[in-house]
Amino acid sequence: MVDRSGSADLSLSAGREMLTGPVDLRKKRRAGETIIQAFLFLCGAITILTTLGIIYVLGREALLFFGSGAVTLGEFFTGTQWQPQIGNFGVLPLVNATLMTTAIAMLIALPLGLMVAIYLSEYASARARSVLKPTLEVLAGIPTIVYGYFALTFMTPLLRQIFGRDVVEIYNTASAGIVMGILILPLISSMSEDALSAVPRSLREAAYGLGATRLETAVRIVVPAAISGIAAAFIVGISRAIGETMIVAIAAGAGPKLTFNPFEGAETMTGHIVRISGGDLSYGSIDYTSLFAIALLLFVMTLILNIISQRIVRLFREVYE
């Protein structure tokens, strides 16, 4: 017995098409999706326009500073004194203090952040991870001004007890850098842990099958496979340290000073901007426009680090099937 119901249905649908015309299979526009798409495009456009506006303002005021004839580009980048009152605009002391605090912070945050990420990804149980991850996020949510006073009231006295009061000044870059490392630690550990967790489980199982221990698998297999994400996390952490303001403004000291001693006070670029912008500066004065020159240099440094981060991610990215 032959079932002709299917052919009958096809005949009916074909006849219906002949009477009503072909069925329109094109994508129909939905008002809700169009509105959402337009809103997302608007958000992206606002972000781009805001960035361009910041670049325009920084560039305009910086051109006024360099166009005044008070300083040349060579003197600005190579001068060892920053004293606007007497016409010395050498940014090197501010850059040196910024790089010192950043280096100290990275010495604290990079190894600890990577070790925390390896523990969360390879060793921690689900219960331990559920406790540690929110704890790290709480550290990241503490206001930076609280970290600044923590550096001044706890870390500095601790360093003075260890190394001596005659060696460690009350305001110093070491305590600011150490606390900055604590601040950046959750960022680096979270990003690195995400990169490690993205490594396929099959690589770990293959290493275990060859007799590797859990530590050997983590160090020789998982970390090299996630090196692009880890490197990106490190560079993002460096950018975060360079742009940190309140910790260095409170704990590192005031007054530009070219020194390589971490136990002495020195003023960073962001700390100087905060200190000077809080005073009575007349619009268009040389002191006022000099702040925008420093801010533009800070913006360029951060931009270069972000470009390097993207290049590293593209260079070492590995795609697994």
Image (cartoon, helix red, strand yellow):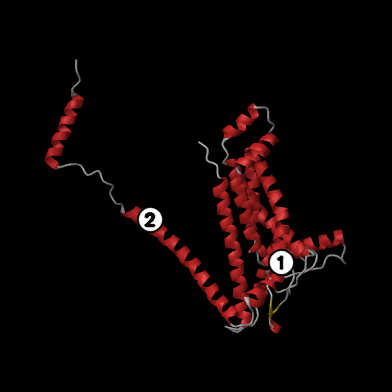
Residue 295, quarter of the rendered image: bottom right
Question: Residue 20: which disc?
Answer: none
List x then y, in percent, for residue 233: 61, 51
Q: Is residue 170 left or right of residue 114?
A: right
| Res 258 seen here | yes
N-terminal label among 2 and 1 = 2
- Rendered image: mark on residue 37: 2
Q: Considering only vertical position in the picture, is 211 above or below 139?
A: above
Q: Is residue 96 left or right of residue 47?
A: right
Callout 2 amino acid: Gln
Residue at position x 88%, y 63% in the image: 164
How crowded pointer 2 is (Cα within 10 Å; few <14, some 14-19, many 20+) is rated as: few
Name the residue beneath numbered marker 1: 96
Going by the numbered disc 1, the residue's amino acid type is Asn
Residue 225 rendering spot, x and y as whole percentages: 60, 40
Q: Residue at x 42, y 57 (%)?
A: 40
Q: In whole angstroms, how far apart are the C-alphas of marks 2 and 1?
A: 46 Å
Q: Nearer the viewer, mark 2 or mark 1?
A: 1
Is there a contact, CB below 8 Å, between mark 2 and mark 1?
no
- Give the quadrant of the N terminus: top left
Q: Residue furthest front?
A: 74
Give percent across and percent down for residue 275.
67, 75
Is residue 190 shown to the viewer in this render? no
Disc 1, SS:
helix
- Nearest the eye: 302 or 215: 302
Residue 97 lies, in percent from the top left, at: 72, 67
State which quadrant residue 206 falls in.
Answer: top right
Badge 1 density bin: few <14, some 14–19, many ≥20, Cα 10 Å = many
